Amino acid sequence: MVTPAGPGAVRADLEQVFRTAYPRVVAVAARVLGSRDEAEDVAQEVFLTFCRSSVPAGESAGWLSVAAAHTALNHLRSGRRRASREEAAGEPRNALSPDVADTVVAIEERRRVRAALARLPRKQAIALVLRHSGLSYTEVAAALDLSPGSVGTTVRRAESALRKELNRHASSH
Amino acid sequence: MRHPTDGTLRRLLDEPEGVADADREHVAGCPVCRSGLAGVQDDAAFAGAALRFEDAPDTDEGWRRLSAAVEAGESPPAGARSPRWRTTLGRPVVAVAAAVALLTGATAAAATDWLQIFRTEQIAPVTIRQADLLKIPDLSGYGEVRFTEQARIRQVADAAAARAASGLSVPEVARLPRGVSGDPEFHVGNRVSAEFTFSAEKAAKTAAATGQTLPPPPAGLDGSRFRLTAGPGVAAVWTQGRGMPALIVGRAVSPTAYSSGVPFATARDYLLSMSGLPEDVAAQLRTFTGDGRTLPVHVMAEELTSRPADVNGVPATVLTSRDEVLAAVVWVRDGVVTAVAGPLSGDEVLTVARGLRWER
C-alpha cells in the first residue's frame, strides 16, 4: 500500500499534479475503455487514491498512468460499467477523429477493442496501453517488473493478439 | 547469426537506440527480418489506431469534481488500483541486501503489486577500508528478511541455451587475451529476490545491543516492506581445465529495489544514520544516491583499486587487485550489468570488453 501522508491529510501538491497529469490519466483509461466519460470516472478514482498517498511528486506521472491502466482494466473485467456509460461510448464527442475512424475502427468497434483488451493477459494489456500512451520501454518495464528487453516481446504479443481478436470478431460478424 | 526476436523488431520501431548495433545491422541486411519488421510495424499501427484517443478532457471540470469529492471525504471505490510505488532505500542497505539476495536467494512475491524503485544504470565505486565493511549492518537486525526466490545456478550446453534460460544474450569475445583459448562453459542463474520488512522494535534492540539509542524512526518506516531483486544472469567461463576461471564474461539484470512505503530520502537518511559507516563514507554515499541509478561497488582498499573507464561510450569501472593478479571491468546499460573479469590486467579486461560482439 502507498503510505498515507497522515490521517486524513490531503497532499499539498494535489492541484498542481492534477492539472499537469489529468489529460494523460484520462487518455490512458480511455484507451482501455473507449469512452471519455468513463475514463474521467476512472481518473477521479485514481486521483482520490493519489491525494492521500505519499508518492513522490517526481514519480507521480508514472504512478498515475499505471494506476489508471489497472483501474480501467478492473472496470472492464468486473463488468462495473454502467448502462449509461455504454450509451456514452456511442456519443459523437467520444468518437475517434473521422479520418481514423473511417479507416480503422468505428464506434461499434470500440466495444470490440474493449472486449479484446479484457481477454488479453493482464501484463500484455497493461504493457500495450502504457506503450501506446507514450511511456518508454524503461517506464513500462518498471511498471510491470520486466526487463526493458522483454517489453518489446510483451507489447508485440499483445498487438498481435489484439489484431487477431479484432479480425476474428470482424469476420464472424 | 540468429535472427533477432520479434520483441527486438518491435523495439526497433520505437526505440532503435535501445537495440544492439549488431541486431540493427542484421535487420538492415536480412530480407527475412525486413519482412518480419513490416508485419510487426503493421500490427503496431493497427493497435495504435485501435487505441487512439485524442479527445482532451475538461481539466477545470475534473478539478472541481475532485475537490468536491475530497472535501466530502470520499474514498476511492474498491476497484481503484493503488500501485505499490517505488521509494528508494538507503543505498548501502540496498547494496548489501542485493548481495545477500544474490548469495542466498526464496515464494514468489505478488510481483504485480510492486513497482520498481530503481534500476541500476551506473556503477560507482565506494572505497571502504576492510574493517569498515564489518560494520555494515546485517539487515536481519532491523526487521524481517525473507527470500522469495532462491538462487539456482546451473551449467547449460551453449550460448543459445544460456540465452533461452536467462533471456540475456551472451556477447562473443572477438579476441581472447593471451593465455586464454578454447570454448567457454555457460552458466545461468535465475532471478533471486528478498523481501525486507523494517521493524522499529528489532532495530531498537539491535541498537541497544551495541550500546546505542535508536533515533525515532520516521513516520511510516516501521512495517514498510522493501523487495530487492537481482538477476537473472548468465556467464561464459573459460576455465582452461585448471579449475580456476581464466576469463569470465557475465551479464545480469541489475539489482532492483521496490518499496511499498516511505519516501526515499527519509528512509535513506535514517538508515545511513545508523549504518555504522564512518561519516565520510556515508557522506560519499549520499552524494550519488540522488537518482537511484548508481550501483555502489564496495572496494576493499587493502585489496582492490578502482578507476573509471569507458566501454564504447558507456561509463565503466575497472577494479584491479593490488597484487595485479585479478582485474574486472563492470558497466551497466539498459538495466543489465555486464562484467569481464579474470586473472588479467586492467587493460586486458578493458580490451576484451571493448571488443565484445553483441550478436545473438
Image (cartoon, coloured by chain):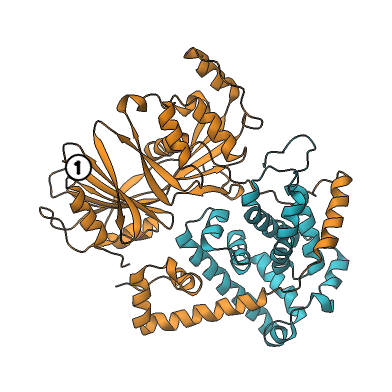
Which chain does the numbered disc 1 sit on? B
**Residue B54: x, y in percent?**
72, 74
Disc 1 packing (10 Å; few <14; some 14–19; many ≥20): some
Residue A143 is drawn in which quadrant?
Answer: bottom right
What amino acid type is highlighted by mark number 1? Leu
**Residue B65: x, y in percent?**
86, 56
| Figure chain in cyan | A
Asked if one can make out residue B97 in the rendered structure from this viewpoint, the answer is no
Asked if one can make out residue B115 in the rendered structure from this viewpoint, the answer is yes
Secondary-structure class at tag 1: loop
Q: Quadrant of the N terminus of chain B?
A: bottom left
Residue drawn 61% across the image and 75% down it: B47
Compared to B147, does B311 lie above or below?
A: below
Residue drawn 77% across the image and 52% down it: A15
**Residue B353: x, y in percent?**
26, 57
Compared to B282, does A16 lie above or below?
A: below
Q: Quadrant of the C terminus of chain B?
A: bottom left
In this image, B174 relative to B275: left or right? left
**Residue B211: x, y in percent?**
49, 12
Residue lying furthest left? B179
Residue drawn 62% across the image and 61% down it: A126
- Foreground pick, B87 / B260: B87
What residue is disc 1 on?
A: B326
Compared to A87, does A126 lie above or below?
A: above
- Foreground pick, B253 / B284: B284
Q: How many marks?
A: 1
- Foreground pick, B226 / A110: B226
Residue drawn 58% across the image and 59% down it: A123
In this image, B129 relative to B342: left or right? right
In the figure, the shade used to draw chain B is orange
